[in-house]
Image: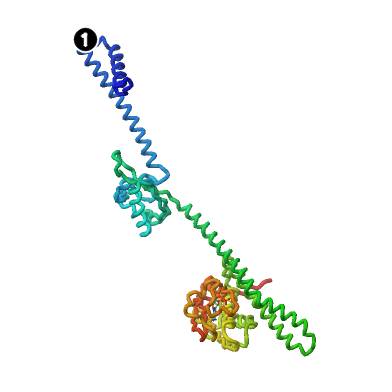
Amino acid sequence: MSKTDPKKNNFLKLRKAAEEKLNKNKSDLKTGKDLELGLYKIELELQNEELLRTQQNLLSSINEYTELFEYAPIGYFILDVNGVILKINETGSKQLGISKTKILKKYFSTLIKHKSCQDRFYLHKNLAIESGKKQQMECKLIRHNGTAFYGLVESIKVKDEHNKFKFLLCTIVDISTQKKQEELLGNSLKKEIKLNELKSQFISIASHEFRTPLSTILTSAELIERYTKKEDEEKKQKHYTKIKTSVNRIKEILIDFLSADQIQKGNKKNNPKIFNLVDFMESAIDETKSFNELHSVKYTHTGEKQNVFLDETLLKTCVSNIIINAYKYSPKGGNINIKTEQKKSGSIVIEITDEGIGIPASNESNIFEQFFRGKNASNIPGTGLGLSITKKLINLMGGEISFKSKENIGTTFTIRFGTKIEPKREIKTVK
Ligand code: ADP
């Protein structure tokens, strides 16, 4: 044993303390044997005291660690190699809203909501055990009452003194608030990206689509200037019409872009009011007649003739879009059939049929997408916005839009609204 051997030092300290204590009580001891026994007894008593002190220190540090384990701000789960829960701290049981006894011996994966995430946890656990490196995953966890929260799960292998697997320590941190914020941020980012896309699409379409009507306006205006004679009046009228058509085209594009922008920003609101469907349809047909190129338009209404309760402005945008498309995508002089039907229940059907180019079957599923244009429509001016706007607005009003079409035969667009009970019209006298 070296001079600094702690065991020897302890023994010497103990012997010295025992001798000092014995010297004080020497008078009580009669023989040398008594002396030796007394010395051992005191040594034992001192050892006992030391042991008690150590035990107390140990107990208080165990208590400290237990408190640290139980009340840590994160949930601790001790799992065996198969992922069975052996121990859980107070925070963990609070996170899941379940008593500790009820959760023990359960598979940790049963706390995970989705099957795909349970499979991910299986890989995560195995990787943590095999690699010895900390693993991390995010998933939805289910509380005992069935509600769910987003958790960050971290797992690390703990080894015993022989460097063998002892247990897997999993921690859960509730990250629901963070996830919600991320989601909100992601949504506004998506909105921003969509808006930017819309702006750049606008610039490219506007520069392309405005070119033809603008140059028509310029040419017609220049020609009108030159027609000074009385007999040129007819030619002048022709060019006035051309100018009007071109201005209409520009107006149509601008309205489409403005509506798309408003919808994107969530600024379009449904404000239903009472109006008469037949009067409404007649004015919609009248307002779009500048797009009519010798088409024959027939409008019929069947069923009830009561007022309807819808957003008139939004419905006007939708119906006008479809009527203008019927003009645009069918040959000059073609028939356009417009029908409305109002049932006793209050439900409404609006149908617009043309005998035009039709929608190719392969394009049918895309027709309501923003900026989508049919493959047979490339030589007809358009932005591909009208139908996507129409569908969004119809849905906003609680209705549905569908279509039936056959290439080179024609297309029917149908708008439906369910039961709309007309609210009693209150007659108020304003004094
Ligand atoms: P735009 O008419 O400006 O291209 P829309 O969103 O109104 O945009 O229409 C999208 C596409 O749907 C059109 O490009 C066209 O291919 C097709 N389409 C719409 N209405 C009709 C119709 N009545 N007949 C044939 N095709 C149509």
Residue at the outermost right position: 229
Q: In the image, what residue occupies the spot 42% across and 51% down?
A: 152
User: For the residue carrying disc 1, how many other residues have a C-alpha within 10 Å: few (<14), some (14-19), or many (20+)?
Assistant: few
Q: In the image, what residue occupies the spot 48% across and 55% down?
A: 180
Q: Is residue 423 visible?
A: no
Q: Is residue 233 visible?
A: yes
Secondary element type, mark 1: loop
Image x and y of residue 248, in percent:
66, 78
Residue in front for this viewpoint, 394 or 8: 8
Residue in front for this viewpoint, 164 or 50: 164
- Say above or below: 44 vs 179: above
Residue 321 placement, left or right of 151: right
Q: Which residue is mark 1?
A: 30
Quarter of the image where the N terminus is located? top left
Question: Which quadrant of the view contains residue 68?
Answer: top left
Residue 339 placement, left or right of 176: right
Q: In the image, what residue occupies the spot 50% across and 55% down?
A: 182
Q: Which coloring applies here?
A: rainbow
- Say above or below: 263 vs 75: below
Residue in front for this viewpoint, 339 or 426: 339
Ligand 1 is found in which quarter of the picture? bottom right
- Say above or below: 150 vs 54: below
Image x and y of residue 170, in percent:
36, 47
All told, the count of numbered labels is: 1
